[in-house]
Amino acid sequence: MSDWRKSSYSTSGGNCVEVREHGNGADVRDTQNRDQGTVSVSAGEWVSLLSLVTR
């Protein structure tokens, strides 16, 4: 599994998310509350989300 990466849209000291992509999709977590768990999405859901936010 790959390393966690912080969103390039995150600002210093602001609300940030991190993502870890893997063969089945991706995991997303809140940078400031890493111990609160993750949201996991399938590969299809991840591709759909990325296509929406990169328009």
Image (cartoon, rainbow, N blue to C red):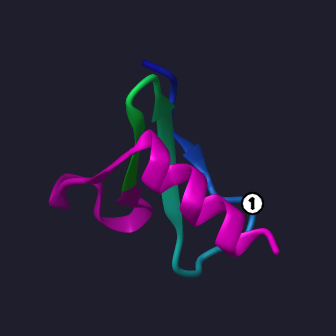
Q: Report x, y in % for residue 49.
A: 56, 64
Q: Is residue 21 above or below residue 34?
A: above
Quadrant for residue 5, please give it: top right
Q: Which residue is mark 1?
A: 8
Q: Report x, y in % for residue 17.
A: 50, 63
Q: Report x, y in % for residue 45.
A: 44, 55
Residue range in magenta is: 29-55
Residue at position x 26%, y 53% in the image: 38
Quadrant for residue 12, please give it: bottom right
**Magenta stretch contains residue 15:** no
Q: Quadrant of the N terminus?
A: top left
Residue 10 visible (yes or no)? no
Left or right of 43? Residue 10 is: right
Query: Tag 1, which secondary structure?
Result: loop
Q: Is 6 or 27 nearer to us in this picture?
A: 27
Q: Is 50 or 10 nearer to us in this picture?
A: 50
Residue at position x 50%, y 52% in the image: 46
Q: Is residue 21 above or below residue 35?
A: above
Q: Is 14 or 29 nearer to us in this picture?
A: 29
Left or right of 8? Residue 23 is: left
